[in-house]
Image (tube, rainbow, N blue to C red):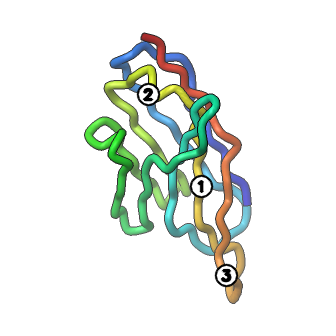
Amino acid sequence: VQLQAYGGGLVQAGGSLRLSCAASGTFVSIYDMVWFRQAPGKERVLVATITRDGSTNYADFVKGRFTISRDNAENTVYLQMKSRKPEDTAVYYCNANIRAHWGRASSHYWGQGTLVTVSS
């Protein structure tokens, strides 16, 4: 199982950007999918989560600006970011709870991270 995140880049403050993270390989089911971010010199923090049935939860610092969504048929989670701020500059990581085999517990997998830089 692999998670591949992409879509990062350089954007101006106030601009929009959409990140994607796709799961590939052999697996049975994908449960919660999550976006984290890690700013330079800071700890990794949770940004948004989405359950398999589409229920979402957001960190206070992105509420109203970011939207998490998923396409279960494509095994992909998205993060639409609007009204970007310089403090949103970070490496964004996706994480997914995936059951790789029937009869075994699910595990959390990480994507490699994609850098988003917001210029003022």
Q: Residues within 10 Å of mark 2 (few under 14, many from 20)?
A: some
Q: Which amino acid does label 2 sit on?
A: Leu
Residue 14: percent from the left, percent from the top?
A: 33, 18
**Would residue 1 appear left or right of 45 to someone viewing this image?**
right
Q: Nearer the viewer, mark 2 or mark 1?
A: 1
At x 65%, y 65%, the residue is 108
Q: Is residue 64 above or below residue 90?
A: below
How far apart are labels 1 and 3 at the CA level?
16 Å
* Disc 1 secondary structure class: strand
How far apart are labels 2 and 1 at the CA level?
19 Å
* Disc 3 secondary structure class: loop
Outermost bottom residue: 103
Q: Name the residue under label 1.
A: 95
Q: Mark 2 points at which residue?
A: 17
Quadrant hosting residue 84: top left
Q: Mark 3 points at which residue?
A: 105
Residue 49: percent from the left, percent from the top?
A: 44, 56
Residue 30: percent from the left, percent from the top?
A: 56, 67
